[in-house]
Image (spheres, grey):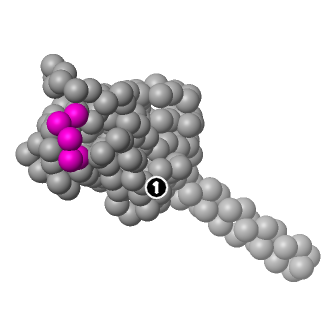
Amino acid sequence: MKENRSNTLLLTVIGVATLLVAVIGASFAYFTATISGSESATTVTVGAGSLAIAYSGGQSIETGLLEPVPEPYDPVASKEFTITGTNSTTAIMPYTIKLVVTGNTFTSDTLEYSLDSTNTGGNGYVVPDIARTGIATGASNISLGTGYFSGVVSNSVHTYILHIYFPDTGENQDIDKNKEFTAYVDTTVEQVYTTTPAP
């Protein structure tokens, strides 16, 4: 009889402990996301000029554990990159920047991106700043815009920072727990011009 009470007590304690672990685990579940891709520091030669593309921090942005962020909606991840132009001719060297999303299981527009642009070297035209914009579910190829370097230039820099946001809506966002996001920044060289294109 005493043994049955001990077994019952032990099973009750195990049951309560299991329930507590499940409740605590559910309460502190985090969101996860990683931005990664095939980008790397590269140099593209265009006639008598070159564009050097460098991405800070290697090929990926590691976010670790991710939760919705309340106002003022600081980014959950950022990728800074620079494009450096050198040209000994008067040609225009344009480039296009894209955000290539290889996978996004978050609900559409749950994650957002923005772009900050700086014409650090004072030459040519940078891709304009982009305000926070929603990202659709699934794979997508998002054009961020085209910039260029103009005329004879030596090591002129255009600086960009791409931000990813996970805004807290103030409503239940449990539907987006344990979702995944993978993407990378792709910079490509466009046709070289002999006259300056209109921005």
Q: Residue 179, position in %: x, y?
A: 55, 41
Q: On the image, which quarter does residue 94 sit in?
A: top left
Residue 41 against residue 196 in the figure, above or below: below
Q: Which residues are magenta?
A: 87-91
The quadrant of the image that shows the C terminus is top left
> Element under label 1?
loop
Q: Residue 14, position in %: x, y?
A: 73, 68
Which residue occupies 36% across, 30% down?
190
The quadrant of the image that shows the N terminus is bottom right
What residue sits right under mark 1 in the picture? 40
Q: Residues within 10 Å of mark 1 (few under 14, many from 20)?
A: some
- Number of labels in the image equals 1
- Amino acid type of disc 1? Ser
The furthest residue to the left: 122
Q: Is residue 49 left or right of residue 151?
A: right
124 and 87: which one is in front? 87
Residue 119 against residue 128 in the figure, above or below: below
Q: Is residue 46 visible?
A: yes
Which residue occupies 53% across, 49% down?
38
Residue 17 against residue 22 in the figure, above or below: below
